[in-house]
Amino acid sequence: MFNSVEEYLDALQDEMKDADPALAQDAQADAREHLSLALDAAREKAPDGSEADALKSIVEEYGTPEETASAYREIERRTSPSLKRDSKPKSIWGRVFGVYVDPRTWGSLLFMFITFVTGIIYFTWAVTGTMLSLSLMILIIGAPFAILFLLSVQGLALLEGRLVEALLGVRMPRRPLFAQPGLTWGERLKALINDKHTWLSLLYFILQMPLGVLYFSLMVTLILFSLGVIIIPIGQWVFRFPTYQINSVGYYLPVWSLLLIQLGGFLLLTLTMHLARGIGWLHGRYAKALLVS
Amino acid sequence: MTELGAQTKKFQKELNSGTSSLILLSVLSRSKEPMYGYQIAKLLEESGPDIPMMKQGTLYPVLRSLEENSLLESTVEPSVSGPPRRYYKITKDGRAALEEWLEIWKQTKKFVDANLKG
């Protein structure tokens, strides 16, 4: 039983986790194309039906994730055994320094810098909205205001999901949740309040600000420090800049240590990159847990 | 699922694995415009018998493998709503293959029918 196309795709990915990643990707693209089109057609035919019901009959025709996965594997086995690429394990050098050319590293870094800004916006929005909703509850406009605010939280969650997917590479929902039509204001508010998705998203938005500040300061400090350590020996060697200066007396590092210090700076930068990629990976999992439940 | 049901399913699957390539090539050879998977699935559903012979999801890997063997070619086009669609078109090699396959199919059908009558 699937509530959304994303759930089906997740199940399919799960079924194909041992398969060639490219094959799994093909299967994902095909299933996404077919199921979305079929769902659109079903919506047109019965606009009031629920997404889960429509998907049930669509999946019946399309095949369960197990059936689909086995169809892809079977064809792959039959047609191109000789073309099968074996994924070679990377050398230790590739694993340590490959981090510089890994798009995930740069995506994570960019995400952390962006979070510094979006975190503040999310936090302000979440706190202001919550406070106003609570205090307006005693007035007649309280309920509509709360609904609008909670809907905006879901919208923001979708937006943040797109950002997380683009920069951190974790698959997030591409479409808003199917809203049940024909509800009164009160029922709609109740549905939103009973949806744990709403509250987890709100929590995520509030936590984004401290996280954004932490990510930003951590990364800026580490990167600037590593770059400084790499550049200082060059300054001393080429321009005769002292490493530090006290009472107009310049202090220089011994010449033999310059290259070692640079090497240290480079290693620190490499470690920072690994840290960035690691944090990006963790944040992706965390965002998925809170925003998609 | 009972043991017999599983056997029947397997038999159906094995039959389909050959015929689906033939059907897809034939459908695409008759179509003037390139078609995408969902379109093909709908077409088969309309023309097919009441019992769905194969799961629609199994068409897609067949399309991909036909393309890999250059019997089909495809282009991806973005759509206004939803994910991009992959449009398939039959190639010259595909038409040649289809002609041979149709011949084989005719002979197979004759052979099977003749033997089933006993």
Image (cartoon, coloured by chain):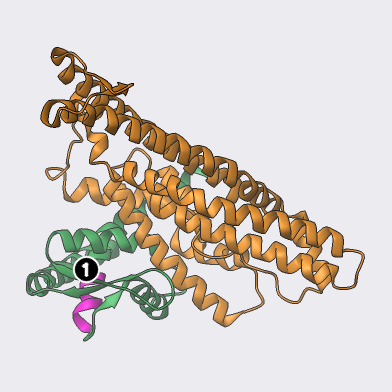
Chain colours: A orange, B green
Q: Name the residue under label 1.
A: B22
Of A88 and A101, which appears nearest the observer?
A: A101
**Image position, residue B107 (x, y; %):** 15, 68
Q: Is residue A83 visible?
A: yes
In the rendered view, tell whether residue A240 sits above or below residue A256: below
Q: In this view, does B87 lie to the left or right of A221?
A: left
Point out the stretch of residues depicted in magenta: B22-30
Magenta includes B25?
A: yes
Residue A289: percent from left, percent from top: 57, 43
Q: Residue at point 24% right, 38% down?
A: A100
Is residue A151 toward the left or the right of residue B98 in the image?
right
Q: In this view, does A173 lie to the left or right of A179?
A: left
Q: Residue furthest bottom?
A: B32
The tally of labels here is 1
In the rendered image, residue A189, in percent from the top left (x then y), is placed at 79, 64
In the figure, A217 relative to B60: above or below?
A: above
Residue at the image point whose x is 38% and y is 40% from the top: A17
Residue B93, position in %: x, y? 7, 70
Q: Is residue A65 left or right of residue A152?
A: left
Question: Residue drawn at (33%, 34%), measured in percent from left and top?
Answer: A273
Q: Viewer-proximal residue, B55 or A110?
A: A110
- Say which of A267 and A293 sits in front: A267
In this rendered view, identify the residue nearer to me: B2 or A273: A273
At label 1, which amino acid type do we have? Leu
Does residue A233 lie above or below A78 as drawn? Answer: above
| A154 is within the stretch colored magenta | no
Work out which quarter of the rendered image holds the N terminus of chain A and state it: bottom right
Q: Magenta residues: mostly which secondary structure? A: helix
**Local crowd at mark 1 within 10 Å, few (<14), some, or many (≥20)?**
some
Question: Could you tell me which chain the residue with mark 1 belongs to?
Answer: B
Mark 1, secondary structure of its residue = helix
